[in-house]
Amino acid sequence: MSAIYILWWRELRRYSRSRAQLVASLGQPLLYLLVLGFGFGHVFQRAGMGNYFQFISPGVIGMTVLFSSIFSGLGLLFDRQFGFLKETLVAPISRLQIMIGRTLGGATVAVIQGLIVMFISVIAGFRPQNILSIPMAMGFMILIALCFAALGMAIGSGLQDMQGFQLIMNFLVMPIYFLSGAIFPLVGQGSIMSFLTRLDPLSYGIDGMRNVLGAPNAAFNPILDLIVLVAVGFVLLIVGAWRFSKIEA
Amino acid sequence: MIRVQNLVKTFGSFTAVNDVSFDVAEGEIFAFLGPNGAGKTTTIKMLTTLLRPTSGSIELDGLNPQTHHNQARQRFGIVFQDPSLDGELTAWENMELHGVLYHVPTKVRRQRAEELLKLFELWDRKDEQAKKFSGGMKRRLEIARGFLHTPKILFLDEPTLGLDPQSRNQLWTHVKNVNEKEKVTVFLTTHYMDEADRVAHRIGVIDHGKLVAQGTPREIKDSTGTESLEDAFLKLTGSAIRDESASGADQLRQFAQMWQKGGR
């Protein structure tokens, strides 16, 4: 138990230490939120889809949580390169404990990042439908964070160098983001797009947030969002733990 | 305390450790010597549960590290050849984290961490991030950390690499100290033959993955008819320089590895 705690604590400590990383990681979501959010406003309104800023805010919050959590898992690569991974692997604790501690730590950081972006979006004009919807949205953030921290862990366990990292970024993280309907509505898409977007777990996370926050153009039932996320999260955590247990240093 | 029998580790077609057997008694300081790429670190990795042996058996304090990971890990401490600190954390936090991972009770942990940081002259800078330390300081911190929990077996993989003579002296004095007082068994590797000669009770020489000599420093010198351990070592392992990627065969091997799947 204490081992899980100390590894969780380490992730938070590292997060609070690196101010530069904190600012850098908020830059991209803010760009999407403010530039796209306001830039597309007119077109979106005229197309009869409602307020675009209301629509994109949950999407950008989801994106922030996605990036932050998946990178925490990929952080395994850096720990491998800087050698710290070995220190935990030879400690008298199980691989599962290490995996859980790291995943929870990464997920916590991701949720904090998501809350910061939510806070900024509210300042910029985003209005959740009521005060209760904020903790519910946070619940979806936690689920997204756990899913992708575990996915990052599963991938990070096999990554040996920086080239692999770029590959994951371009062929996994960005598609997950763009196909999630974070920046465009999932309703009324053609069959190929509908199919692809439905394969993306993040779609359900962001859609769930849209549902509970009362943002326009939610595509699915919130209960479906919840069930899919929990199920996918469960599977990814098992895969992550399994992949992590196979690491040899 | 450590019993290794017919240990083999192969990576593809390359045999890193080839049928190695040795015993280290409780309270003994055993030096494992060999040129670069001889299989020292691979052996340590197998002893410390980081790698699975291809075949052969290992016993640490009567336990098989393959089946009893955690019990075995609780019994040893290790100072790695390459860095393993978290650079973002301070020296103190690195110690704390290690202590918690090894289940050292809070009071003992704090007290020992303070003693060790003072011993290795890092106490004044305990609240600085490890990444800001010089190479020697990082090394000292790793060593201090290795002593934090009181292991039965201490693995030191080239611990004095990059240390100045003062720190080296400090380290060996401390190693001898815990060996005598706490009966810690020490398994070390080094490239400094004089250190091995001075500290080790027994020595094993490994070359190309095979154990080529074993015995007390005296025995090894006598059996090769040499005056110093350095000469004995050169006589046993030859004077050709080994660089792991020097030969054409090695390059080919590397090339072949590139095409194999990465996740080893």
Image: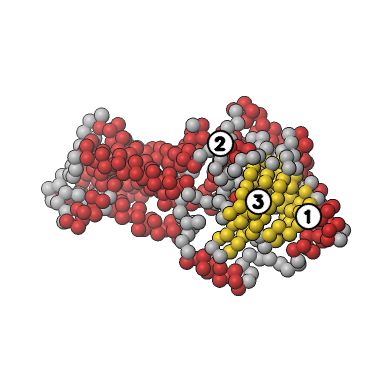
Q: Name above or below for residue B124 compared with residue B235.
A: above
Residue at the far top in the pictured view:
B107
Quarter of the view holding residue B124:
top right
What residue would you read off at disc 2?
Answer: B101
Q: Out of B25 and A151, give the one closest to the viewer.
A: B25
Front-lying residue, A249 or B84: A249
The residue located at (48%, 38%) in the rendering is A97
Q: Residue shown at 60%/31% (left/top)?
A: B104
Marked residue nearer the N-terminal end (2 or 3): 3
**Residue A55 - label:** none
Q: Amino acid at mark 2?
A: Leu
What's the residue type where badge 1 is placed?
A: Met
Give the labeled residue for mark 3.
B5
Colour setup of the view: secondary structure
Q: Nearer the viewer, residue A249 or A221?
A: A249
Q: Amino acid at mark 3?
A: Gln
Say which residue appears at 67% left-offset and 55% top-offset. B20
Judge from the rendering whether residue A155 lies leftward or rightward of residue B69; answer left or right.
left
Vertically, is A160 above or below B250? above
Work out how far the residue at label 1 is from the one at label 2, CA to CA, in angstroms.
Answer: 34 Å
